[in-house]
Image (cartoon, helix red, strand yellow):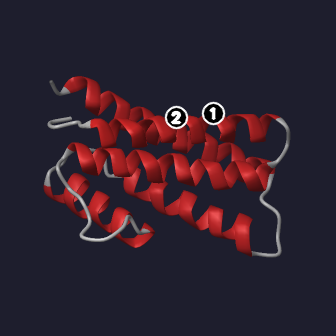
Amino acid sequence: MPGMDGDAEIYLGKAGESLLTAESEFAFGRYNSCANRCYYAAFQAAIAALLGEGIRPTGRWTHEYVQAQFAGQLINRRKRFDPRLRRILQSTSYLRVEADYQINMVKRTEANRALRESQEFVEAVRARKELVP
């Protein structure tokens, strides 16, 4: 990505770590924890993508800001990513809230879908980074 700086690399590294944790949690049947880490893998990759495009918040990285800027700037306006990634960021966010705050448990099928989607999201950001000098 143009201007991919150290901060963006750090967030991409965090996304990779969250993804590895999600994979491990899934393998051990801890689907609520898997869902949590799937969302954070996508969230951290989205931050890396925003930083790579020179987009920073005036304050801190809030979930609302990251989701709005990723969809608004990098998907709709600049056309840097497939629109499908917007839905992935939203759906993994909803599943994380369910896993963390709701009384029901995340099912294996839900965690499996979130894992595949978060892997796709992180890979899309990594691929974009590699395509641009």
How many residues crowd mark 2 within 10 Å: few (<14), some (14–19), many (20+)? many
Residue 27 vertical placement versus 38 (above, below):
above
**What residue is rendered at 37% in x and 50% in y?**
46
Give percent across and percent down for residue 40: 54, 52
Q: To which quarter of the image does residue 80 belong?
A: top left
**Horizontal side, residue 130 vs residue 101: left or right:** left
Give the residue type that dot 1 points to: Leu
Give percent across and percent down for residue 21: 67, 38
The residue lying toward the viewer, choosing from 11 and 107, is 11
Give the quarter of the figure containing the N terminus. top left
Give percent across and percent down for residue 11: 41, 43
Disc 1 element? helix
**Horizontal side, residue 22 vs residue 106: left or right:** left
Q: Which residue is mark 1?
A: 20
Give percent across and percent down for residue 117: 54, 43
Mark 1 vs 2: CB contact within 8 A = yes
**What residue is rendered at 77% in x and 59% in y?**
106
The residue lying toward the viewer, choosing from 104 and 22, is 22
Mark-to-mark CA distance, 1 and 2: 6 Å
Label of residue 41 in the image: none
Residue 53 vertical placement versus 27 (above, below):
below
Label of residue 16 in the image: 2
Give the quarter of the figure containing the C terminus. top left
Residue 29 vertical placement versus 32 (above, below):
above
Residue 53 vertical placement versus 95 (above, below):
above
How many residues crowd mark 1 within 10 Å: few (<14), some (14–19), many (20+)? some
